[in-house]
Image (cartoon, rainbow, N blue to C red):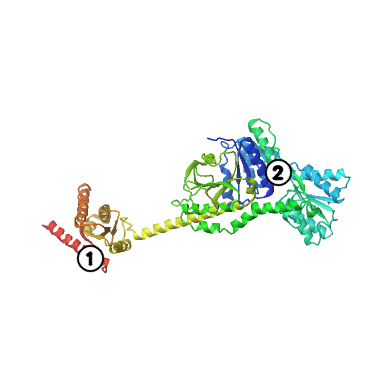
Amino acid sequence: MKKRRTIAVIAADVFNDYMNRILVGISEQCRALGYDAISFLMAFNLDSGNLIQQGEENIFTLIKKEVIDGVILMAGNISSQNLVDKFVKVFSHWGIPVVAIDYDVDFCETIYAEDTELFEQMTDHFIEKHGCQKITCLTGPEGNTPALSRLEGYKRSMKKHGLEIGPHDIVYGDFWKIVSRRIAKQYINGEWEIPDAVVCANDVMARSLCTSLVKGGFRIPEDIRVSGYDGSNDAILCIPSITTISPRNERLGAKAVCRLHKLITGEETEPLATLHDGEMLFARSCGCGSATKYSVETSENYHNMIERYEQYYSKSGMLESLMEEENLDGLLHKLNGFAYVVNGIDTYMLCLCKDWDNVEESEDNYVREGYAAEMQTKFVYTKRDTDFVSRSFASADILPDFIDEYCTEPSMYFILPVHFMDRCFGYSIFRFSDVKCAASSVFAEWNKNISTALEFLRVRTKLISINQRILMSSIRDTLTGVYNRKGFNRKADAIFKMAKDEQKMLFLLIADLDHLKMINDNFGHIEGDNAITIAANALNACCDTNEICARIGGDEYAVVGCGYYTDAKAREKINYIRRYFDRYNSSSRKEYKVELSLGYSCSVPDADSQLEKYIEIADEKMYEDKVQRKKQRVD
């Protein structure tokens, strides 16, 4: 039974500052309103449609309208347009509350960062602080809402200061590197007039522009000033450091939660006052140095939060170590020793589909889409303890119904698929003591290592199973199922050695099927095979756990064992076999009888003796029994 309302956050990957700040806002606001938030992620965020991507996208099949109260959709973070279209189709059909962030969707409300004013302030700074007159705005794609919002801030500032916007002063970019490199080339080649400053709509374009201009012989900021937008660590820590805008991302995430809360409950609420407002960070690329202290703090924080743990991970040898293990239990215990490389991990659960390894099934028969109805937590790590006990829960619940035993308060959970190519194994659940720790991709790499190690274990187990079957088929008689001559030689040698080493009794029974040729000649080989099988069944039925039965010839058998034997116990076995045939012959309605001639050897082997010695003893007694029984039939 669901105890708290739950919001699904669809974000593909979150391993950057911009996305992480949004998640921090979502997490804090959800906690304040008593919601759990489940962020569904992909370690591979591609638009390829290959098997790996299918395995990644499968994680979203967990989302069910019966469990989720609302959805925050960050579709602009998803590379695959086909996947975005699926979300639109499904969520619009379900009719559950959905709020999109930074991406226009027809069926639901979209919330954007309030960045017009901040962009206006940055443009003001270039004009008022640095006396720039000719300023170019490198914004995002034409028609893109955030790109237009930031462009509007630029236009307001230019108009406010009575500055003219020239024909090349507004450039629609791609939020990536291509356009920024192109306009840098045009400045370098003298095709365009060089502006006093360029205000860029994100940090990636600003960094790329600076790098390209420096390579072309320009000095930053002496020849041209540049700013970005996002407040990313990459911008602050690069050379030259980029003047940038740190937007209201936390408030953006919180605002999305507040809007969902209104759609779910009808209650109005405001974002938490403690969440950060946007700010401008002035650095080397505009000629200011006020961000020096901030740069140092950012560098220290980046090292402590991300870089240090990336170094731990890169030196851990985690994948190779996990792949050494020969069973799941060993792998999980080894995994426990690598929790230290994931910064801030509070709780981790490995949830596998029941029969995840699929060893007995064909290679084509495995879960590709969706998850097994029954999931099992195989490994639960917390800062206090680790639990290796397997516990079952319904995949329809997404989170185990016993998760409150580990996490009692409203929380944000990160869920990543555990798979190899399109073969679904299950999923991982992460909970961090501080959501800011999720900015590092180490936990996603950690999860990928688990996936690879599980596949390696599955394949190794499968190969062992196949090899065992091949081995068993090579040492088993195909007609009767008991050991064949090869199997007898292998097993009997080991039993004989044990008897000699431990000075225990060696029991060896030799049997020969009577009048098999007569049965074949008069009743056919099918009946002959029946007699051979019945004889094997009789001998196999008399075997104890320390004994093996073998068909060592066309109509010859052997039983061998090591333990505490007496002649009385040996004769008891022979009597059991005789009674077995009496029962069979009296009820079979066959025109022939199935009978065996039997002989045995029972003694402690001499230290320098060979197995053949005792086989010959038992064989001689068997021949004596055959002669005597034949004489009795004649008489």
Among the 4 quarters of the image, the one containing residue 179? bottom right
Disc 2 residue crowd, few under 14, some 14–19, many 20+, Cα 10 Å: many
In percent of width and height, residue 89 lies at 62, 40
The residue that appears at 78% across and 60% down in the rendered structure is 214
User: Can residue 46 be seen?
Assistant: no
| Left or right, residue 311 beside residue 393 | right
Instruction: Using the image as rendered, state which of residue 14 and residue 49 is in the foreground.
Output: 14
Please state the total of marks drawn on the protein image: 2
Q: Nearer the viewer, mark 1 or mark 2?
A: 2
- What's the distance in space between the residues labelled 1 and 2, CA to CA? 89 Å
Residue that lies at the very extreme toward the bottom in this rendered image: 608
Q: Amino acid at mark 2?
A: Asn
According to the image, label 2 marks what residue? 249
The residue that appears at 48% across and 42% down in the rendered structure is 392
The residue that appears at 26% across and 69% down in the rendered structure is 608
According to the image, label 1 marks what residue? 616
Q: Amino acid at mark 1?
A: Glu
Element marked by disc 2? helix
In percent of width and height, residue 211 lies at 76, 58
Q: Of label 1 and label 2, which has the lower sequence position?
A: 2
Element marked by disc 1? helix
